Amino acid sequence: MNVRRHHISGAAVAAVTALGLGTLSACSTDSAAAGGTDKFDVVASFYPMAYLAEQIGGDHVSVTSLTEPGQEPHDLEISAQQRTQLEKSDAALYLKGLQPSVDEAVTQSGIKTKIDAATLTTLEEHGTEVGGHAAEHEDEHAAEDAAEDEHGHEEEGGKDPHIWLDPVKYAEVAEGVGKAFEKADPDHAADYKKNTADLVAKLGALDTEFKNGLATTRTKVFITTHAAFGYLAERYGLTEEAISGLDPESEPSGARVKELEKMAKADGVTTVFYETLVSDKTAKTIAGDANLKTDVLDPIEGITKKSRGTDYFAVQKANLKALQTALGTT
């Protein structure tokens, strides 16, 4: 619907691109479908962005995700067809620092409304360990862990982009996106405002559910394949120990593996979590060597048939249940 390409401020633009997280009910997931409709056409970088746009936009938007269901977002390379699709759309929603190919394509595109979710909340630097856990072995391998993280996201300086897994931060982004939609498509501003308020309320309820559900546990430490849950760990007083850094494809060092096995025994860790879009081989190897269980903790970077739920909220509730079991809710 190119007629609605109103000018928006940098903050507002950043807003629209903010997050996403769920199924695309009223939207199209066909990468060739974006642009040229009679709705407010939004291209989202991956599922969390697309879900947010769809929830806030409702019937007034047509949302297309650049990342197909089941595709690892970090690996995405933008095609010529997708670049054309960006040019035909009214807005681009993305999270700068997560997908370099998307960052480049959006920057080079002529699209007027470019919304970066990373500007709508505060990003923090996270390593392989995030939270309040302090162990004697921390200093010994701190430099090595930092090097691994640097390798994973060198150009972002270690900034952790996984903000959508924290309901509070996700709500902050949702508010920014809602305001950006209102400015970019003022004819439907009232609906965008209401939809945003409804979504923020649901995220507030989810935050309360996590807070109450994890208030009292036998241990506060959990192990994951890659460092996606740092914000969630900090929010609810937990400590995430990641096998690798922010990049899910990075390989852990032998020292890191031994460190995790020692830490697991010391802190009463029962479970090594893996995710649906990345190989579980390393997680199962470490779990086997340390006599630990394995389970899924989903970073919700995409919804597939293997997902424990059909949208963001359903999968987050499944994540909460998995954490309660692993941590020993009392």
Image (cartoon, rainbow, N blue to C red):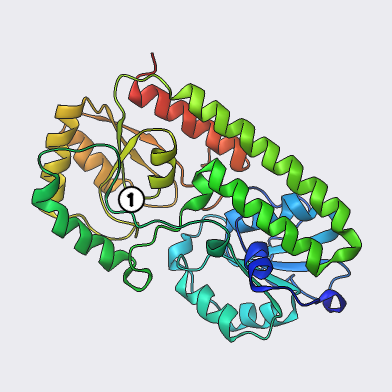
User: In the displayed image of the protein, which residue is found farthest to the top?
Assistant: 330
Q: Quadrant of residue 57?
A: bottom right
Q: Residue at x 61, y 38 (%)?
A: 313
Residue 230: give x, y in percent of width and height: 38, 46
Q: Is residue 112 left or right of residue 2?
A: left
Q: Residues within 10 Å of mark 1 (few under 14, many from 20)?
A: many
Q: Is residue 205 visible?
A: yes
Q: Is residue 296 placed above or below 277 in the rendered structure?
A: above
Q: Is residue 162 above or below residue 305?
A: below
Question: What amino acid is found at the position of numbered circle 1 in the picture?
Answer: His
Q: Position of residue 23 (x, y in %)?
A: 66, 48
Up-down: is 165 above or below 219?
below
Task: Decide which of 306, 320 is in the foreground and name it.
Answer: 320
Q: Nearer the viewer, residue 305 or 102?
A: 102
Does residue 21 show up? no
Q: Position of residue 28 (x, y in %)?
A: 74, 60
Query: Which image quadrant is residue 81 in?
Result: bottom right
Total residue callouts? 1
Residue 216 x/y as whole percent:
39, 19
**Element at badge 1?**
loop
Q: Is residue 107 left or right of residue 97?
A: right
Residue that appears at 75% across and 44% down? 197
Residue at the disc numbered 1: 226
Q: Quadrant of the N terminus?
A: bottom right
Q: Residue at x 16, y 33 (%)?
A: 290
Q: Is residue 191 left or right of residue 117?
A: right
* Quadrant placement of the C terminus: top left
